[in-house]
């Protein structure tokens, strides 16, 4: 496969698609489109100084050399983070499953939707295992999880006269500071 074939296969629309797009928006060229939409003051006056394109095989060799430069270090995050064994079936089907971290829409270029789906599945499993009607899974971190749990408890508590004014939570001084 030539370098041109690799580039055109992976980068941008085809020439017919470009021509159609330009005809629809009424511009004669991509340069005219850029001139009409991107202020000249923020554009570079010269082309980027980029290396020549690589073939797919050349790129794979390059990226593997780069990856070998990575160094693995022991983490010392501490306070609530412990060494654990994660079974390979969980690692592969949950942590390494691209369905959980691939953006589903072009306008949402983050992993939010996959993460939300994973949290919903987690909550469903917790409800199934415990028999509870609701479960909580924090969207952020342990501190947020605690706040969400308190809000959930507060909103589901009995509304009778005895508990109507129950608005205080007590947290042990032994809880990790981050939480």
Image (cartoon, grey):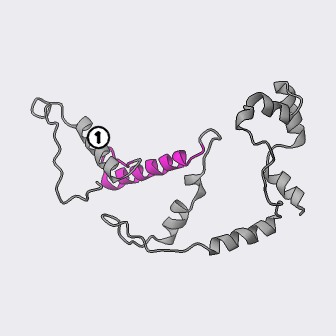
Viewer-nearest residue: 159 or 37 = 37
Please, is residue 145 above or below residue 165 in the view? below
Q: How dense is the environment of label 1, judged by Cα within 10 Å: few (below 14), some, or many (20 and up)?
A: some
Please, is residue 98 above or below residue 43 in the view? below
Q: Position of residue 33 (x, y in %)?
A: 81, 31
Q: Is residue 147 left or right of residue 124?
A: left
User: Looking at the image, how many numbered discs can be counted on the residues?
Assistant: 1
Q: Main secondary structure of the magenta part?
A: helix
Q: Is residue 139 magenta?
A: no
Location of residue 151 by image quarter = top left
**Residue furthest top in the image:** 26
Q: Position of residue 76 (x, y in %)?
A: 38, 70
Q: Position of residue 15 (x, y in %)?
A: 89, 41
Mark 1, secondary structure of its residue = helix
Viewer-nearest residue: 136 or 50 = 50
Residue position marked by numbered label 1 in the rendering: 152
Viewer-nearest residue: 167 or 175 = 175
At x 31% / y 54%, what residue is drawn?
130
Q: Is residue 46 left or right of residue 173?
A: right
Viewer-nearest residue: 64 or 124 = 64
Q: Is residue 49 left or right of residue 100?
A: right
At x 75% / y 72%, what residue is drawn?
61
Q: Is residue 127 magenta?
A: yes
At x 84% / y 35%, what residue is drawn?
31
Q: Is residue 14 left or right of residue 113?
A: right
Please, is residue 6 above or below residue 31 in the view? below
The quarter of the picture where the C terminus appears is bottom left
Which segment is the magenta one? Answer: 109-138
Please, is residue 74 above or below residue 34 in the view? below
The quarter of the picture where the N terminus appears is bottom right
Location of residue 83 by image quarter = bottom left
């Amino acid at each position: 496969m030539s370098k041109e074939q690799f580039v055109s296969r992976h980068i941008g629309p085809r020439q017919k698609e470009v021509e159609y797009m330009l005809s629809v928006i009424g511009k004669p060229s991509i340069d005219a489109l850029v001139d009409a939409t991107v202020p000249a003051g923020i554009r570079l006056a010269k082309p980027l100084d980029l290396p020549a394109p690589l073939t797919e095989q050349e790129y794979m060799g390059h990226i593997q050399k780069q990856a070998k430069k990575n160094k693995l270090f022991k983490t010392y995050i501490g306070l609530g983070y412990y060494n654990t064994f994660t079974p390979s079936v969980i690692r592969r089907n949950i942590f390494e499953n691209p369905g959980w971290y691939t953006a589903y829409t072009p306008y949402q270029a983050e992993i939010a939707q996959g993460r939300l789906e994973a949290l919903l599945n987690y909550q469903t499993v917790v409800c199934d295992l415990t028999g509870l009607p609701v479960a909580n899974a924090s969207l952020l971190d342990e501190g947020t999880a605690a706040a969400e749990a308190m809000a959930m408890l507060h909103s589901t508590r009995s509304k009778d006269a005895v508990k109507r004014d129950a608005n205080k939570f007590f947290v042990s001084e032994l809880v990790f500071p981050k939480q």
